[in-house]
């Protein structure tokens, strides 16, 4: 018995089905009478087109070439209509004499074709082993079905190979296979594992509409010309890590149900993911995009990772949906990404509230006004996810220093975004990122040394940068310094008439205080009016001190009053400067 299709090459006997013979299929003991009524294998069948033999059309289009081979007697219900052995779904041809006969005919067709057409359209293959073979014919496997494993490992197709619409019901192995001319897998269905590891496609290849029901392994594959994966459906993991796309690669409207891994892939020309859907994580880490990369209208329902990727030319993220389904995970990762032409990187109508940007330069990347950022609590401006992502997450490794969040790394992101929006004259947005930058500098306290907890508390609560925040939200708020200014004026107006301080009128020898203007025998009303007049004098003196008046009618008494006045002048001058700074930032042109 012939064990494989390869052994058929060594036979010099031309295929003669009547000579090889097909064994009769053992009928069930309960149906001997039905078995006797089955047609003889040599009986011809008159097809609907008035021709004898197998009625299956062998061309890509109806009416091209009809098979015409002798009909095969298959068990009842196996085939919808009588067909030949090559097109029959008879399970008995998986082994034994029928398998040998199938292999002999297959090798005959392949041998007779030479460098021309070898027609295997709609064949129903048993196990096929062409590993390591050089196949010189133009092979047409259109709409064929491989019932068992198909092994093309290290095979070489020197002519066009057409597997369009082919169904692989078991494993399909094309690892290390070389396709010298065009290859077409459009509409093919891989029910089990599909291995194209390190395969080489010298010319164009199409996987348009192809379905991978189990992991599709294309890592290390080399696509020398155009590669088309439009509307491809990867129902399990898609492995394309380390793949090389020398010409255009089109994944438009492809669907990746599980993880998609393009790490270390090289895209030498344009790559298009227009409308593609990634239902789980998409990994593009350390990938290289030499020409235009389009992610317009793509949907990422898991984390999309471009960490360490290199964008040498333009990239478009227009109406790209970043919407991870797991709460707390980042939507997009651009950590350590390199943008060689940052002005050509466009984010338009995208939500970046959970995107990571640490250790990459975003200062010149184009963010349109429709980009949505995260927000800080209490209406304190915009925020990036690098500030809040839990540091124990995998994607936050680059943000950790000594097990803690590196606030200075986050401050660098805010600084770059502030510079970005400043350069486009969007000062309001830039101010909100300025708040984030300064907030990170406030939180980036000391990390070692003596009295660490005390120094950290001091830096966070009462250092200059902390006071800057309390006074004016780092120069972003003009309302805050005005409120503080009014509060300081009222406070010092209340303090100046205190006993031991007092207000002294020019030429007077005694200072006026709350106690000195109160006359015990005058009653409540005159005394309250006296205190009110003193409060008015103190308020005017407080304003005089804040505005550097030198010839005021009343002055704080020496020495305590003068000390308070100096202190008030310093505070009010600082707050007024912060007020002017905030006004300038908000309304500069």
Image (cartoon, grey):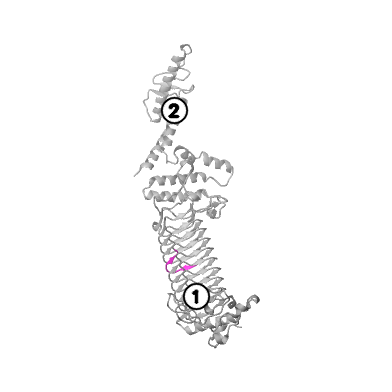
Whether residue 154 is visible, yes or no, is no
The CA distance from mark 1 to mark 2 is: 94 Å
In percent of the image, x 65 and y 75: which residue is there?
30
Comparing labels 1 and 2, the label whose residue is closer to the camera: 1
Residue 468, how many percent across, how many down? 46, 39
Q: Would you say residue 384 sits in the magenta stretch? A: no
123, 502: nearer the viewer: 123
**Which quadrant holds the N terminus?**
bottom right
Q: On screen, 117 above or below 230?
A: below
Residue 343, how many percent across, how many down? 39, 57
Q: On screen, 378 above or below 75?
A: above
Q: Earlier in the sequence, mark 1 or mark 2?
A: 1
Label 1: which residue? 122
Residue 298, how many percent across, how many down? 45, 58
383, 193: nearer the viewer: 193
Total marks shown come to 2
Quadrant in the picture for residue 549? top left
Residue 490's disc number: 2
Residue 92, how many percent across, how many down? 59, 77
Helix, strand or loop for disc 1: loop
Q: Which residues are magenta?
A: 243-251
In percent of the image, x 43 and y 45: which residue is there?
432
Q: Would you say residue 249 sits in the magenta stretch? A: yes
Whether residue 370 is visible, yes or no, is yes
Q: On screen, 359 above or below 212?
A: above
């Amino acid at each position: 018995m012939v064990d494989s299709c390869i052994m058929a090459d060594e036979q010099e006997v031309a295929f003669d089905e009547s000579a090889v013979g097909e064994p009769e299929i053992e009928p069930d003991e309960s149906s001997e009478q039905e078995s006797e009524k089955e047609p003889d294998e040599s009986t011809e069948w008159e097809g609907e087109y008035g021709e004898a033999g197998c009625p299956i059309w062998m061309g890509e289009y109806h009416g091209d070439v009809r098979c015409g081979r002798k009909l095969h007697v298959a068990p009842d219900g196996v085939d919808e209509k009588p067909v030949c052995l090559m097109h029959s779904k008879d399970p008995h041809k998986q082994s034994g004499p029928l398998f040998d006969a199938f292999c002999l005919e297959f090798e005959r067709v392949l041998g007779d074709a030479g460098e021309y057409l070898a027609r295997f359209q709609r064949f129903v293959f048993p196990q096929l082993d062409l590993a390591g073979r050089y196949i010189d014919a133009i092979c047409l496997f259109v709409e064929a079905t491989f019932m068992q494993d198909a092994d093309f490992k290290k095979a070489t197709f020197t002519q066009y190979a057409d597997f369009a619409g082919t169904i692989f019901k078991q494993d399909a192995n094309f690892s290390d296979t070389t396709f010298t001319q065009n290859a077409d897998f459009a509409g093919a269905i891989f029910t089990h594992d599909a291995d194209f590891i390190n395969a080489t496609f010298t010319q164009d290849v199409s996987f348009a509409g192809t379905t991978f029901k189990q992991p599709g392994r294309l890592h290390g594959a080399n696509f020398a010309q155009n590669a088309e994966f439009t509307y491809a459906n990867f129902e399990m993991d898609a492995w394309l890590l380390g793949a090389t796309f020398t010409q255009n690669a089109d994944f438009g409207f492809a669907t990746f149900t599980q993880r998609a891994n393009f790490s270390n892939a090289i895209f030498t020309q344009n790559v298009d993911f227009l409308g593609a859907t990634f239902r789980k994580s998409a990994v593009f880490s350390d990938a290289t995009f030499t020409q235009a990369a389009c992610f317009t209208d793509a949907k990422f329902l898991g984390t999309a990772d471009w960490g360490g990727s290199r964008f040498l030319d333009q990239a478009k993220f227009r109406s790209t949906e970043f919407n991870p389904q797991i709460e707390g995970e980042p939507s997009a990762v651009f950590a350590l990404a390199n943008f060689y032409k940052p002005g050509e990187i466009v984010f338009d109508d995208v939500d970046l509230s959970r995107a990571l940007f640490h250790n990459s330069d975003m200062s010149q990347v184009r963010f349109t006004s429709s980009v949505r950022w995260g927000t800080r609590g209490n209406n304190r401006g915009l925020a990036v996810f690098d500030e809040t992502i839990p540091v124990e997450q995998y994607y936050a490794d680059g943000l950790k220093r000594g097990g803690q969040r590196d606030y200075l790394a986050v401050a660098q992101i805010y600084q770059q975004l502030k510079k970005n929006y400043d350069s486009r004259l969007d000062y309001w947005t830039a101010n909100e990122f300025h708040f984030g930058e300064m907030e990170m500098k406030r939180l980036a306290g000391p990390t070692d040394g003596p009295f660490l907890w005390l120094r950290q508390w001091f830096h966070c609560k009462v250092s200059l940068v902390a006071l800057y925040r309390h006074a004016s939200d780092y120069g972003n708020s003009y309302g805050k310094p005005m409120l503080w200014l009014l509060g300081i004026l009222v406070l010092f107006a209340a303090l100046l008439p205190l006993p031991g301080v007092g207000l002294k009128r020019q030429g007077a020898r005694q200072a006026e205080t709350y106690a000195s203007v109160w006359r015990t025998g005058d009653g409540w009303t005159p005394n309250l009016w006296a205190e009110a007049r003193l409060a008015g004098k103190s308020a005017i003196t407080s304003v005089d001190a804040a505005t550097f008046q030198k010839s005021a009618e009343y002055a704080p008494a020496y020495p305590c009053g003068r000390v308070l006045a100096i202190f008030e002048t310093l505070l009010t001058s600082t707050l007024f400067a912060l007020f002017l700074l905030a006004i300038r930032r908000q309304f500069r042109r």
